[in-house]
Image (tube, rainbow, N blue to C red):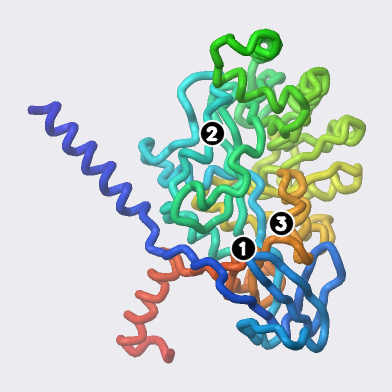
Amino acid sequence: MRLLTTLAISCTIVLATSVAAQSRQVPGPDQDRALLLIDATIHPVTAPDIAGGWMLIEDGRITSLGQGVPPRGVRAQVIDLDGRHVYPGLIAADSVLGLAETEAVDVTHDYNEHGSFTPEAKAVVALNPDSDLIPVTRSSGILTALVVPSGGRLPGKAATIRLDGWTWEDLAIEPDSGLVIEWPSTESSGGRRGGGGSSSGADTNIRAIDDWFNEAEAYLAARAADPTLPPDSRYNAVAAALRGEQRVFMKASTAGQIATAIAWAKARGLQPVILGGEEADRVAHLLVLEQVPVIVRGTHRYPVARHESVSESHALPARLRDAGVRFCIAPRDRPAHLRNLSHHAATAVANGLTPEEGLRSITIDAAEIIGVGDRLGSLEPGKQATFIVTTGDPLQMMTQVQQAWIDGREVDLTSRQTELRDKYREKYRRQGRLDS
């Protein structure tokens, strides 16, 4: 009876969590006619701003944009923005969005596969398209995200997703954006916030990764020589990376981790991207020499070491810029706080980046580093019509995102938060405590 009771309680928790995590927003319909935005302040990011601008969208892509009088003879839905601002949709280059719903409930965590070496695990197939956190994130102007698995040494494949759709197939922009490697810590715990590992332990872990890749190379060579060999999904999953055709996102924070990760990756002919990079400025010369970009995981965090100033993380992007390192910014927050992406970039601007660099760090630079810069991250003819309409600069705290389009489809910007806001506004309006 106790077992049955426990099972019943567990099922109730799972069902309750599932219901709570079920978003109520309906995905946007496909674009069925041309769309013409007029009287807009357009911010292409890769070109000068256009005051009094117009932008034409057809079949989900930007066809043309310009200033002044829009093209004549175009049959399109016309939207007068009355001077409001148009920016490319923001890009979160590191997240577990759709893979985790509630931190305190393990059954909502789908980002960590069992086992240390699971490169065949694809984050995209575990996505929950009905996650309540997707509309919350979308309402802040983030329309694209890199979803990154974690756990073990090779936790799987990252995916680039759009933040609107019925199924994970609808969400997927790039279902396989690259291999993820959790690089071992190379420092002891002395003086470091959160600790670390011993050098001997790091050597053992690095050797284990190296041995696994040696096995993968041997298997792939054997199968190329004899195609009748039985397939192995784990080894096949790293084939593109080993050929240098696919990015490898290497989670590394300290200078020692970053340096050893780059040396190991380059020796194998891989395309490394550092994910984390808290001490990337200390090995900036190596990052520049090897042309390795960094996804800076947030500026709202404690410094790596106890003796460092709290402003260390705030100014890291500016230091990387000064050293010539390619970078973008992504919050290290869990998915409920991914919506703060623009505030992380704003903090970097307040500590040395220019406003233009801050905006690029969460648009075109992020798009290029994760491999979708040819389609997203800026407003240019031929690119996907994924953009936001705002009341001002998205790096400013008071700016509101009022409308958004993904691939030419207008998407719903309501969320659980906006519904609760409206509910309690109505409550106080009825009590006479609000004028409108």
Question: Disc 2 designates what residue?
Answer: 122
**How far is the residue under mark 2 from the one under mark 1?**
24 Å
Quadrant of the snapshot with the C terminus: bottom left
**How far is the residue under mark 1 from the one under mark 3?**
10 Å
Quadrant of the snapshot with the N terminus: top left
The three-letter code of the residue at mark 1 reads Asp
Question: Disc 1 designates what residue?
Answer: 407
How packed is label 3: few (under 14 Cα within 10 Å), some, or many (20 or more)?
Answer: many
Residue at image position (65%, 87%) is 80
Residue at image position (80%, 88%) is 69
Occupied quadrant, residue 422: bottom left
Residue at image position (61%, 59%) is 142
Occupied quadrant, residue 390: bottom right
Question: Disc 3 designates what residue?
Answer: 376
The answer to which of 56 and 160 lies nearer the viewer is 56
Q: Is residue 333 above or below residue 60?
A: above
On the picture, is 130 further left or further right than 278? left
Mark 2 or 1, nearer chain start:
2
On the picture, is 359 further left or further right than 27? right
Residue 388 in percent (x, y) is at 64, 69
Residue 91 in percent (x, y) is at 66, 54
**How far is the residue under mark 3 from the one under mark 2?**
22 Å
Element under disc 2 = loop
How packed is label 1: few (under 14 Cα within 10 Å), some, or many (20 or more)?
Answer: many
The three-letter code of the residue at mark 3 reads Leu
Element under disc 3 = loop
The answer to which of 169 and 345 lies nearer the viewer is 169
Element under disc 1 = loop
How many labels were placed on the picture? 3
Residue at image position (60%, 59%) is 143
* Comparing labels 2 and 1, the label whose residue is closer to the camera: 1
Q: Are marks 2 and 1 in contact (CB under 8 Å)?
A: no
